[in-house]
Amino acid sequence: MTKNILFAGFGGQGILFSGKIAAYSGLLEGKEVSWLPSYGPEMRGGTANCSVVISDEQVASPLVLNPDILMVMNVQSFDKFIDSVVPGGVVLVDSTLVSKKTTRTDISVYEVPATKLAADNGLEGLANMILMGKMLETTSFVSYDIMKKALEKTIPPKKAHLLDGNLKAIDMGMKYEG
């Protein structure tokens, strides 16, 4: 089984970190993984996306052109990638920042007001983790316990105090029913 995941948005939204967590989670599950970040020269505020492949077999290409799972956090990314999602794929949209809708009926789209939920719950900057929680709940691409371990391993020691907020954001995304 192979999962091709694409994370996309602006720099500073945690796009690359989300991809890192997904890839590390796959690694902890004993899978073959690749993590390929890409960002515009502007960095914060510029475009950012991250291709992640999690597979039972050797990964042939790290570039995700047709994602099974797409997480988008800005309109530009929605416009650019929505048509590339494979039929039967899953799309997670931060509906606080993306009001556009797709006419595709062959994919499952989950609109989560992640930025608003983060702001309303004192979790500023963790909209990406709310979407990760929804991704985890809808796709089960890894287990919750594995994702928690991946967070513990990838959050730098000097930022260890942020673990609880990240876990709270993931839980919020998993429980979101909107």
Image (spheres, rainbow, N blue to C red):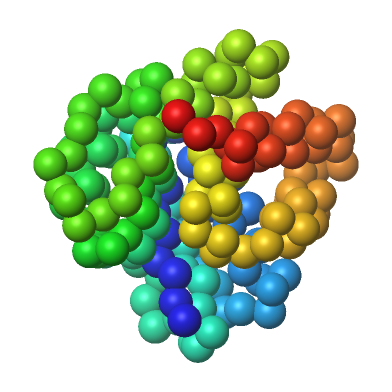
Up the image or down, 69 lies above or below 46; here it is: below
Up the image or down, 38 lies above or below 76; here it is: below
On the question of residue 67 being in view, the answer is no
Q: Which of 56 and 62 is in front in this view?
A: 56
Q: Which of 22 and 49 is in front in this view?
A: 22
Quarter location, residue 33: bottom right
Report the residue at 18% width, 39% height from top.
102
Report the residue at 33% width, 29% height from top.
74
Residue projecting furthest to the front: 177
Q: Is residue 68 left or right of residue 114?
A: left
Up the image or down, 152 lies above or below 29; here it is: above
Can you give x and y, in whole percent of width and height, for residue 77 in the image? 28, 38
Up the image or down, 13 lies above or below 90; here it is: above
Counting labels gives: 0
Q: Nearer the viewer, residue 144 or 165?
A: 144
Q: Is residue 58 left or right of residue 66?
A: right
Report the residue at 69% width, 73% height from top.
29
